[in-house]
Amino acid sequence: MKKREKWQVYIIGGLCFLTAASISVQYRSVQKYTTKADVSVQSMSENKLRDNVLKEQENYQKLTKELQTKLDELENLRKISASNSEESKQLETELSELNRLLGYTDVKGKGLVITLEDADSSKNGYTNENIIHDLDLVDIVNELFNAGAEAISINGQRITTSSSINCNGNVVKINNEKISVPFVIKAIGSPEGLYGTMTRPGSYLSLMEDGAIKIKIEKKDELTVSKFNGTHQFKYMQVAE
């Protein structure tokens, strides 16, 4: 469907809604005047009441005709859009691609699974470095994206451009959802490339190993990264015309 036709559908649909709402008001007005004719005959002449009722009925009929006209136009536009199958398929393809890029669809492919757990608390000298923090997850995610990861999730929470990873007391929150250890990080991309980056000397995971953090890295021929369940909010970005 062409952009112009889509806007016509939205506009006509809105007009149908407003017209229907007006009909409802007019209908209630007719009922109101009819009721007044029964209970307030002494305070208003019968002729005046009859004139008011007739006027409301005329308005009601006029709005009904307008609504039917708009509904007919809307139906015609729907038929036109349905008949233009090639353009509809193209629009559907573009929408699917956009949802994929924004993270609104489940995706699958080769990749890496990293499982993280806090160090054993029973060991002597247990410090803050033996616990996984929100900033640790942020650095790991950044390394994965820099290594070519195309989609990442942590404990089922999809990481997108608007995702937040922060700490609330002793609890880590991602996309405003509380998660806890073990942290299972899934990343779609080249298994060999991601593995080489994350296990190289000086990588962030190697630094975490110095704090006795338990780390497990697995290459996967196929894994699924769940879709983003939140909403993207843009306060400042607008479409350039």
Image (tube, helix red, strand yellow):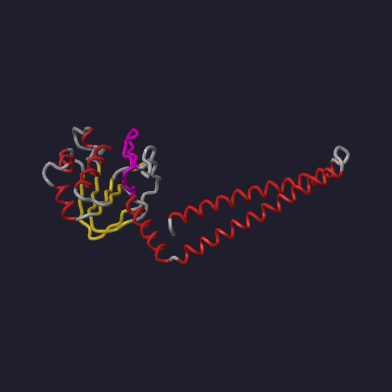
Horizontally, is 120 left or right of 160 in the view? left
The foreground one among 86 and 132 is 86
Taking the magenta stretch, the answer to whether it contains residue 227 is no
The foreground one among 48 and 199 is 48
Q: Is residue 163 above or below residue 83?
A: above
State the residue at coordinates (86%, 37%): 43
The foreground one among 231 and 68 is 68
Quarter of the rendering containing residue 105: bottom left
Horizontally, is 161 left or right of 44 in the view? left
Horizontally, is 57 left or right of 127 in the view? right
Q: Residue furthest left?
A: 201
Place of residue 69 in the rendered image (x, y in percent of width and height, measured from the top left): 61, 57
> How many numbered marks appear?
0
Taking the magenta stretch, the answer to whether it contains residue 166 is yes
Q: Is residue 178 above or below residue 89?
A: above
Place of residue 98 in the rendered image (x, y in percent of width and height, measured from the top left): 35, 53
Quarter of the rendering containing residue 110: bottom left
Split into 4 quadrants, where in the image is the C terminus? top left
State the residue at coordinates (18%, 38%): 211
User: Magenta stretch?
Assistant: 156-174
Split into 4 quadrants, where in the image is the N terminus? bottom left
Horizontally, is 108 left or right of 25 in the view? left
Place of residue 16 in the rendered image (x, y in percent of width and height, measured from the top left): 59, 52
Place of residue 194 in the rendered image (x, y in percent of width and height, measured from the top left): 18, 51
State the residue at coordinates (47%, 65%): 82
State the residue at coordinates (36%, 57%): 94
